[in-house]
Every structure is written in structure tokens, then in C-alpha cells.
Amino acid sequence: MIHTYPLEEIGQINRQLDPCIIIIFGATGDLTARKLIPALYNLKRDNQLPPNFACIGFARREQSEEQFRKEQREAVGKYSRMQPLDESVWKEFEKHLFYHSSEFQKEEGYRSLKERLAQIDQEHGTKGNRIYYLSTQPEYFAVIIQQLKKQNLLYDVTTVKTKWSRVIIEKPFGHDLASAKNLQQQLLSHLSEEQIYRIDHYLGKETVQNILVFRFANSIFESLWNHRYIDHIQITVAESIGIESRGNFFEKEGLLRDIIQNHMMQLLTLIAMEPPANLHADAVRDEKVKVLQSIRPVINQDLDRIAIRGQYASGYTFGEKVVGYREEADVAKDSNIETYVALKLFIDNWRWAGVPFYLRGGKRLPKRATEIAIVFQRPPGILFSVQEKENNPNILVIRVQPNEGIALTINSKAPGPASPIQPVKMDFCYGAFFGLTPPEAYERLICECIFGDTTLFAREDEVFNSWAIFDPLLQHWAEKKEIFPNYTAGSWGPKEADQLIEADGRKWRLL
Ligand code: BG6
């Protein structure tokens, strides 16, 4: 039987959300169509948006409001998690959807935006509250903020108490530590830290939020959650897709900046952190920062032994021929950029002393799978160690996506007189148990921002500490020419990545 629970009962959003307008900069881009507008539409459909709400798309392209709505309707039809599109919900939603065209640097565009906002406030009762969602190329972040400030569209939190203005910033937040600090400085001359919401959409995923509940709302795991019982931890973010049409972006960023420095470090800190004093944003983020600060600096280690990178050659994914990275549009024919990374990190603190954290992430791998595997130490193997292969470790797997769930592998006696020992799985699946599709990460994060809760957003020192870990590695890679490509699309990455873990007598999990 499928159990279903109303959203309120399982602790989903049931809060009073202030009226507001969301202004999306870069509204003709991919993220708006694939994620942001579908998220807003689904929130509307689930009655999770404030009744007094509007959204303005801000972009350079000149087009009518009608055209913008039409495009976004198509996008929702294609990308929304709820299918098919509900015409009556869309009709209602689009009455609150507007378009404003301007260059990002032009003062005039912000003057007219200000008038538009005032008019919408009047017509829709949005009370002067604003979320500015910066979904543009990072080079525009500072200029947009500057222009908004010039028009008094960003309120000073110390003096303005009757309305609020918040800014959501898409990643990448900087390109390295120095540029992240530089960007932060530019933002802080117009905003305060509490107005900045640095998005890492992994924090909006249900399964990622469940990590803290799993660890701290159960008593049986936490006592084992340390170097005395855990042999090692594997974190995998595997994607079957390539770089799609993002050649320009990828040539600048590479996989370490795209996935590891942010998403995977969020997973790692949530798995490794100490219990926070409470669930307030800063208490949680303080603990995450301590983990980052305890990571053994890579600079003192042999970088080529703890970090492997790869770039895909042409191959097959799901039986379909795909081109290599260097053949993708906007990619240099001799590109030195990585599309795969495997890493070994240590957290030098009391809890994790000596426990390796193996991380791997890549594009064009055989399947899409994000998971965290906690591999416990093997049992002593005195009574049942007839064969080495029967002495399996217990493994706890948190499946972030797809098929969201948690599985625990235990050893069991197979039926029959020969009684071999066999690993069996206890498996919890979200979908089957709760009987609902979990909301998309962006739905949750937009709501959190309207609510004014920064817990699920990265704080400045999280970002800085994470860059500090990877800066030396990025610099090393920038100077070192690799023999690329070194793995076939549709395979599990370069053989050196296997050697990285096998040198320690361990293996990557088969997914
Ligand atoms: C984005 C990266 O942040 O995350 C993409 O820029 C990546 O390259 C995506 O594909 C993965 O997100 P998800 O939610 O599909 O795991």
C-alpha cells in the first residue's frame, strides 16, 4: 500500500510568505526556461506562492511580453515536473508574469524598471518586496547590483524595516579565491551579507536536506558515524549528459569548478559536520565551515596521486554515438579542460582522522547517479570468514538521485544447508513510501528566499574556504598539459581514477 502524507504533515512549507516581485536577470537564458519558471509555475500550482506575487523577466533581447509568456509556457510544458501543463493554472500564473528588456549596463533600463515595479506594486499588492535573481554571466553581477542601488531598488537593511530586497546569485561565485573575494567586496558596497542568497541547487534537493534529519533525528547511526566504524566514504555525481550547448562556459570553468567546488562539497560537509547547536542558518553553516577548515590542504600532498582529471573522447551513451569534448561547439581542439575529476580528501579532525573521502564526478558517464556511500569497516571475520568474499562491509547508501532513497547493505545467511553469506539490502524509496514527486530544488530555494531563510544557501566563508582548498589544485592543472582525451564517453572515467582508489585496497562502487 502506498502511504501518502499531506505536505504540511511531512514538514513541508506551510508558512506565511510575504507578497513580493521576483525579477529574473537573464530571463531569456536556459536556466529560466528549464528551472526557474517551471519552479514558479509548480509553486503556483501547489499554492505555495504568496497570493500577491509577480515575476518580471529582465533580459537584453527585445521582444513583447506576449512572446516571453509564450516561450515560457512552452518551457513549462517541456520541463515542469508536473505534466501535462494545467491550462487554468498557467492562465492564472501568466497574469503575474512580465517582461522588461534592457542592456544590463544601461541606467535607463533600471529607471524604467523602477517605474514598472511601482506600477506592479499598485496593481498586485506586492508591497515593495523584491527578489533580484541574477541568472546572468558572472561578469554582470556587480554591474546589475550597482545599477539597482543607484535607483534605490536595494534597501538598506539597517534603516528600511517595512519592506525587503534580496539578491539570489547563481553560481559560479568567483573563479577562484581571489575573484570570489573581489566579487564579495563589490557586492558588499551595495548590500549586506544577509541580503545575499548564493544558490547551490543541491541544497534544495529533498534528499540532501534529509541528510541532517537522517543523521540527527535517529539515534542508531550517529554513534557509528566516525573513524572507529567507518572505513571510507565515496561521493559520486555521475552524469550521462555531456556539456550540452555550454562549451563557452565549460572552457572557462571545467568540472572541478562546475560540480566539485560547490555541489559535492555541500554533500561532503553535510555528511561530515558535527551536530549544530540549533537549526538556525548560522549554526548550521558554522559547522559546515569547520569541516572545510579541517580538510587537509592539498598543497602538502602529491597532487597527481590524490586528484585525477579526465576529458571524454567520443563514444556511446545509451547506444547513441556522441562526440568527444573537443568536438563539441565552442571548445578548443586542444582543450586542456577536465570533464571528469576523482579526488581523495582527508578531514583532519577528531571524528574523521584517517578516513578517506573519495569523490568522483563526471560528464558522459554511463548513467546519471548521485549518491553518498558510507562504507563501514569489515566485521572481524572470525566466525564467518570461510571465504574472503563473504566478509562484506556494511554499506549505507544515500541515493540523492534518481530513485531517491536510502539503502543499507547487511550480510545475511542465504537459505539452504550450504549457507553462504550474502549481502542483502534494506531499501527505503521516497517515491514509493511518500507517494509524491519531491518538489524540485529551485521550488524549495525560491520559497526559502521569499521567507528570508538563508540556511539552504552558501555563506561567504563557505565559498571562500572551498576555493581555498582547490586553488592550488586548479593552479597545478592550469600549468600541466594533460594527454586528453583519456576516457571514452559512456565509460566510468580514466583508468587512473581506478588506480587512485585501488592503490588503497578499495574500489569504486558499481552503480
Ligand atoms: C549544474 C551544473 O550546477 O548542475 C551542470 O552547472 C550539471 O553542469 C548540473 O549538469 C547537475 O544538476 P542536477 O540537479 O541534474 O544533478
Image (cartoon, grey):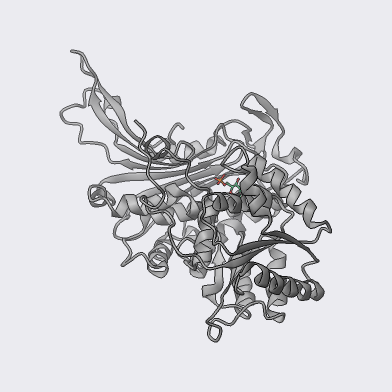
Residue 461 picture location, percent across and down = 49, 69
Q: Nearer the viewer, residue 268 or 103?
A: 103
Q: Nearer the viewer, residue 476 or 112?
A: 112
Asked if one can make out residue 480 in the rendered structure from this viewpoint, the answer is no
In this view, which residue lies farthest toward the top? 417
Residue 122 picture quarter:
bottom right
In this view, which residue lies farthest toward the bottom? 159
Tell me which residue sits at (52%, 58%) in the image.
445
Q: Nearer the viewer, residue 23 or 377?
A: 23
Tell me which residue sits at (51%, 39%) in the image.
497
Q: Is residue 189 left or right of residue 445?
A: right
Identify whether 178 is placed above or below 353. Answer: below
Q: Is residue 98 left or right of residue 404?
A: right
Residue 509 picture location, percent across and down = 43, 34
Tell me which residue sits at (70%, 52%) in the image.
249
In this view, which residue lies farthest toward the right? 62
Asked if one can make out residue 11 in the rendered structure from this viewpoint, the answer is yes
Residue 284 picture location, percent across and down = 39, 64
Tell me which residue sits at (60%, 43%) in the image.
80
Residue 127 picture quarter:
bottom right
